[in-house]
Amino acid sequence: MTAIIGKLAPTKRPGELGIHSMDTFTMTVPDLTVADNFYRAFGLDVREEGEKLALYTFGLDHRWMTISEAGQKKLNHLSFGVFEEDFEPMRRRIEGQGVRLMDPPRGIDSNGFWFFDPFGVLVEVKIAEKTTPSEKTPFFLGSCPGGVAGAPQRSKADTVRPTRLAHILLFTPDVQGAIDFYSRTLGLRLSDRSGDGICFMHGIHGSDHHLVAFARSSAPGLHHCSWDMGGINEVGKGAMQMAEKGFSRGWGMGRHVLGSNYFHYVRDPWGSYSEYSADIDYIPADHDWEAGDYPPEDSLYLWGPEMPKDFVHNYEADDER
Ligand SMILES: [Fe+2]
């Protein structure tokens, strides 16, 4: 089997059942033209597919995200990928836990199985290629030897393009409940947490420190999607690229503690964020990561500007809108 990301063949932890990737997700926004403009500026390959926008990274034929038009911005569904031989055992396990499986929503072509999580988020599990890397993503510093200029003139800087979707952070009314549910159904494992405020979860078959994370709110929602850039310079250039196109609000540049990635978050037109990320921690398939629980002031960021006061705000929740 070839790898869709990186050079290694997909890794697998023997004898254990779990999804290998966060394959794709869908959301709605009030105006597709606004979304097209934002994600194109961000450096993604935005394609019109029927009535929807599909988001790809340049050079890779994998649809990471699909956006359709509806009254307000809202997370629609999450789709996780499993190895073919794990599909039926996983379906049996999840059904055996009393989770009611359902038909795919109308208009969605799917050979996966579908269910709601305890908080009303629609989830699909399907056979898919492993899009989560099977080794730590290379990190480029771009340092030059003596006698050579390292940085181009600003006018000659190229446009940044993310290499892949790295993870998403979701709001949930119950962080512990999310850990319990996604562990027993999808086989995700807790990487680290900060009490009942936020948690980060990884896949067992070799995955970044988190494929999905959950932050507490009164309702489900999408806080951010994160895109790998391959280098800290690309994170900084991305921030500049977006500021020049009018998207200057956000948070960064900085370095996280949990996950260790360098970050810059760009606020999107709906009050959520797209994150430029580089050098996130990696958990190989044969490694048991020891999950920690850290106080908020000692877990969020190692360095960077102060976090904006409204950074963790769920605009999808009725009582926070
Ligand atoms: Fe993130």
Image (cartoon, grey):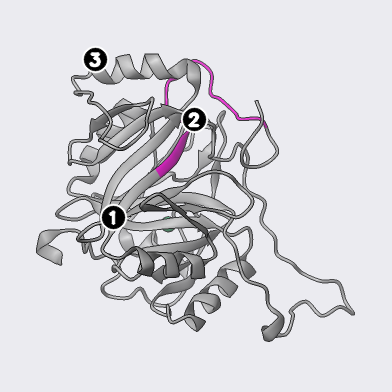
Q: Which mark is residue 151?
A: none
Residue in the picture at 25% in, 35% down: 105
Residue type indicated by callout 1: Thr
Q: Is the residue 113 above or below the residue 281 in the image?
A: above
Q: Is residue 32 left or right of residue 264?
A: left
Mark 3 and mark 2 lie on one chain; the one further toward the N terminus is 3
Residue 18 lies within the magenta run:
yes
Q: Which residue is mark 1?
A: 28
Q: Quadrant of the N terminus?
A: top right
Task: Note whether 129 is above or below 267 in the view shown.
Answer: above
Q: Which residue is mark 3?
A: 96
Q: Residue 143 location in percent, x, y?
A: 76, 69
As drawn, the label of residue 128 is 2
Distance, label 3 to label 1, CA atoms, is 32 Å
Q: Nearer the viewer, residue 212 or 258?
A: 212
Q: Nearer the viewer, mark 3 or mark 2?
A: 2
Kindly state the secondary structure of the residue where label 2 is placed.
loop
Tell me which label, 3 or 1, sits earlier in the chain: 1
The span from disc 1 to disc 2 (Cα, nearest Å) is: 23 Å
- Residue 19 visible in image: no
- In the image, ligand 1 is in what quadrant? bottom left
Q: Nearer the viewer, residue 60 or 144?
A: 60
Badge 1 density bin: few <14, some 14–19, many ≥20, Cα 10 Å: some
The residue sitting at 37% across, 58% down in the picture is 224
Mark 2 surroundings within 10 Å by alpha-carbon count, few (fewer than 14), some (14 through 19), many (20 or more): some
* Disc nearer the start of the sequence (1/2): 1
